[in-house]
Image: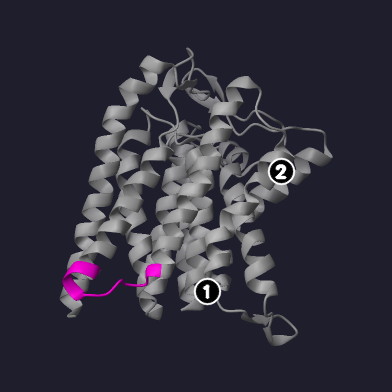
């Protein structure tokens, strides 16, 4: 197979991913309003209601693109390109999105306790465990290279996927934020995996990036659809899967810096008895910080903007995305 053919297959698959996501969202938004699957946009006055659970169609669109890629290789080249990895990633994405969907639906009846929601994401990694994804030999600080054996696929992989799914769900609540963060993670993962020659991870990153670009058309300010936990669980788990499949955990952890900061701020809130919300307080066309202290990365952005040019939803999102872009660029510079 020529190099040009591989790029052609990727282009077709990415177009399918973006187009399927776009068309499905176009049809879902009016249906969601008709069925009552809407939520209040908390960063806007007046109780504006927006369609929910848009993340379902990101999963469907991106998996459609992955299946097209597999079909092109099978029918035109005569073999199934990285079938274990691509099918495993697709199943993992669907499993994570399903758990997020159940969570979104149960919120209407009070939802599950946080600990149960966290534990429900543990089985998401099953497809990676089954195919024994990743390499168990890792460089551990102070110890050097260590072969972790079955501890890696049976324990570290499920814990990593569960952690990423829940962490990605924490930094959310603003139009375009979750999808924008996901898009940046996919772009930087694509650049890194391409530079390292890990082409199946490059393909998976670009196909998901295409779906996210289409989703942002509907989720950017003013959003017509929310991603929901369907999206955040799915995106976090999928990102973890790419890092594991690519065997670049150090780079993956570096890209997740803002999520580690979000977790530390969340713990700070818990220690001070604050069950924090990420949203700002709408006041005269601006957003004000909801607390005196910062218990989220969004609160830090709100405070910075409030003391300078004034905070709006778009500015908060843009500032956080700019910080993520800088972290990604630095990680590429240091680790490539």
Which residue is depicted at the point 67% across and 84% down? Answer: 147
Task: Please say whether residue 82 is one of the residues in the magenta stretch.
Answer: yes
**Residue linked to disc 1:** 248
Where is 55 relative to 190, above or below? above
Task: Please say whether residue 332 is one of the residues in the magenta stretch.
Answer: no
Can residue 99 be seen? yes
Q: Where on the picture, by quarter, is residue 132?
A: bottom right
Residue 251, percent from left and from top: 53, 70
| Chain-order first, disc 2 or disc 1 | 1
Find the residue positioned furthest to the top: 46
Q: Quadrant of the N terminus?
A: bottom left
Indicate the secondary structure of the residue bearing disc 2: helix
Q: Which of 183 and 10 is in front in this view?
A: 10
**Residue linked to disc 2:** 266
For label 1, count other residues whose C-alpha is less than 10 Å away and answer few (under 14), some (14-19) or many (20+): some
Which residue is depicted at the point 16% across and 75% down? Answer: 4
Query: Which span is picked out in magenta?
Result: 74-83
């Amino acid at each position: 197979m020529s190099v040009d053919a591989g790029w052609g297959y990727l282009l077709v698959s990415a177009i399918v991913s973006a187009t399927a996501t776009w068309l499905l969202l176009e049809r879902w938004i009016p249906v969601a309003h008709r069925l009552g699957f809407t939520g209040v946009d908390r960063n806007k006055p007046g109780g504006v209601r927006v369609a929910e659970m848009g993340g379902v169609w990101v999963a469907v669109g991106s998996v459609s693109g992955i299946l097209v890629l597999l079909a092109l290789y099978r029918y035109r080249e005569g073999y199934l390109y990285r079938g274990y990895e691509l099918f495993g990633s697709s199943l993992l994405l669907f499993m994570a999105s399903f758990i997020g969907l159940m969570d979104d639906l149960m919120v209407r009846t009070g939802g599950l306790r946080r600990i149960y929601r966290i534990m429900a994401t543990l089985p998401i990694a099953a497809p990676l465990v089954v195919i024994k994804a990743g390499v168990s030999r890792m460089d551990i600080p102070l110890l050097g290279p260590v072969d972790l054996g079955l501890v890696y696929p049976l324990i570290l992989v499920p814990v990593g996927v569960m952690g990423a799914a829940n962490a990605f769900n924490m930094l959310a609540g603003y139009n375009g934020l979750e999808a924008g963060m996901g898009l940046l993670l996919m772009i930087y993962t694509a650049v890194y995996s391409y530079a390292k020659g890990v082409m199946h991870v490059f393909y998976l990153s670009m196909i998901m990036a295409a779906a996210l670009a289409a989703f942002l058309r509907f989720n950017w300010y003013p959003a017509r659809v929310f991603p929901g936990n369907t999206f955040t669980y799915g995106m976090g788990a999928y990102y973890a899967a790419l890092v594991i499949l690519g065997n670049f955990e150090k780079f993956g952890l570096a890209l997740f810096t803002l999520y580690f900061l979000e977790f530390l701020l969340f713990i700070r809130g818990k220690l001070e008895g604050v069950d924090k919300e990420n949203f700002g307080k709408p006041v005269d066309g601006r957003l004000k910080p909801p607390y005196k202290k910062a218990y989220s990365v969004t609160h830090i952005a709100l405070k910075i903007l409030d003391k300078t040019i004034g905070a709006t939803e778009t500015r908060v999102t843009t500032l956080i995305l700019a910080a993520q872009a800088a972290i990604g660029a630095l990680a590429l510079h240091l680790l490539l």
